[in-house]
Image (tube, rainbow, N blue to C red):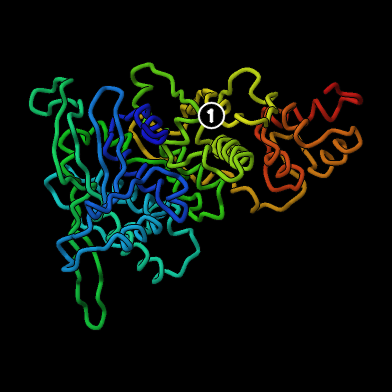
Amino acid sequence: MRRKQDWQENMPIPANPVVYAAMGAIWAGGPKWEQKGIWEIKPEENTAQVRYSSSNGGQIQVWVDPRVESEMAVWTMEQITSYLSNLSDFTADVALAVLAALAEAKEPLLQPTIIDAKTIIRQKGIEARGENREKLCKAIEKEMENLLRLRFEIRQLPAIDPNTGKWNSKGFSWEHDRLFDIVRIEKYDKNNVAVMWSVRAGHWAYYFLSPAARRWVCNFAGVLLQLSHRQDRKVEVLAKRIGYYVALHKWKLGKGQPLRWSIGTLCQAIGENPMKERNPGRFREAFETALQLLEDRNVFEKVIYPPGYWEDTNRNKGWVENWIKNELTIILPSENEKADGEKIDSKNIPSLPGRNRNRKIKNKGIEIDGQEIKKAREERNWRQAELARHLGISRRYLSDLENGKRKPANEVATKLMRWLKKEQPGK
């Protein structure tokens, strides 16, 4: 049995497994989809697929539909692999924006919701991408077509029986489901043609989109949409995916369960495979910086690392396997969401790293000069990696602090001030 299958069979399925499977399949796409090793090509069936298994039993298979009703021609394998390359975090953003719109429908399974590109653009963050509005509308049209291609096969997936309200451990099965049933509509007005879509949730909503579930699935924090979907901004992409994934598991808190995952499970869940990275050390830095970014932006209150995590500098053969076994606990801030499920007010969220180039960084009345940190470190012959371990942050995070690209979290600012005041600190 291949490593890929072993990894996937140990993956947890959240309260809404179909939404998670869809997000995971999208995240597993992109220009490096082959390197990630999650999508499996099936030439004999003229499709590509991803399988997810639940720890409670049951299985979800996501596959690419080579033919949709609106097209006469059947896609070739070359077109299918091209489709996988074009899946992106913007695809996921559009899917989540549509989910947010469906949250307003009383019967998202039965009652169609009319959505246009402007509705999606109005979602917090999407409008702030700085792209040409017409170009952005065209991109959204393309992503709606991409979402129409994703199909689901459900096999004996445990769920609450909507008719009895009782848990069915033997599960339910159904075929040829979609995340959304989408009908494209063209509205003609003088010389203009406006494109909109009539959208209903797929059959999965019958089991997994109760009014209570919508609070966890549909009302995602607007601050996450503001993070970049561009592949050249790896830290923001990782932060966005991790934030969404944790939001999908927020139901655990209601049952008194901690939000705790191994790094390997988190990476697999967001469509990443550190074992296949060409530069796993750089990936680790990006991953740790992404978690710090989520703390900086108040999406997470704190990420708790296991004892000795920052002191582990071993990079000998096999270190990646050991690193992904580390278990992280994520604490969510209670003030992030009101009791009635309103979205986070992102007006007071600090700017993204790199946008504030000022050297002086203020934090709760403490003024920290990035150049002062660098000068003190060099005078004391401390390498960046050593000081980063001492502070419990990544080397990249420290580099951003020294270059004035980031504001330190309160705890980091306090540690820095203590370190700066010590004349001969011990390593």
In the rendered image, which quarter is residue 382 located in? top right
| 225, 304: nearer the viewer | 304
Helix, strand or loop for disc 1: loop
User: In the visual, does 427 lie left or right of 357?
Assistant: right
What residue lies at 29% left-to-right and 40% top-to-bottom? 19
**Rendered position, 398 above or below 160:** below
**Rendered position, 251 above or below 142:** above
Which quadrant is the C terminus positioned in?
Answer: top right
Residue lying at the far left in this picture: please name it. 163
What residue lies at 22% left-to-right and 60% top-to-bottom? 197
Give x and y (percent) for residue 12.
35, 27
Amino acid at the residue labelled 1: Ile
**Rendered position, 79 above or below 282:** below
What residue lies at 83% left-to-right and 44% top-to-bottom? 371
User: In the visual, does 211 lie left or right of 1?
Assistant: left
In the rendered image, which quarter is residue 314 located in? top right
Give x and y (percent) for residue 257.
39, 18
> What is the total number of numbered labels drawn onto the structure image?
1
Which quadrant is the N terminus positioned in?
Answer: top left
Instruction: Using the rendered image of the protein, determine whether residue 107 is visible from the camera's viewpoint.
Output: no
The residue pinned by badge 1 equals: 324
Instruction: Using the rendered image of the protein, determine whether residue 43 is visible from the camera's viewpoint.
Output: yes
| 8, 361: nearer the viewer | 8
Give x and y (percent) for residue 390.
75, 26
User: In the visual, does 236 lie left or right of 99?
Assistant: right
Give x and y (percent) for residue 281.
63, 39
**Rendered position, 296 above or below 310:** below
What residue lies at 82% left-to-right and 38% top-to-bottom? 373
| 148, 46: nearer the viewer | 46
Q: Residues within 10 Å of mark 1 (few under 14, many from 20)?
A: some
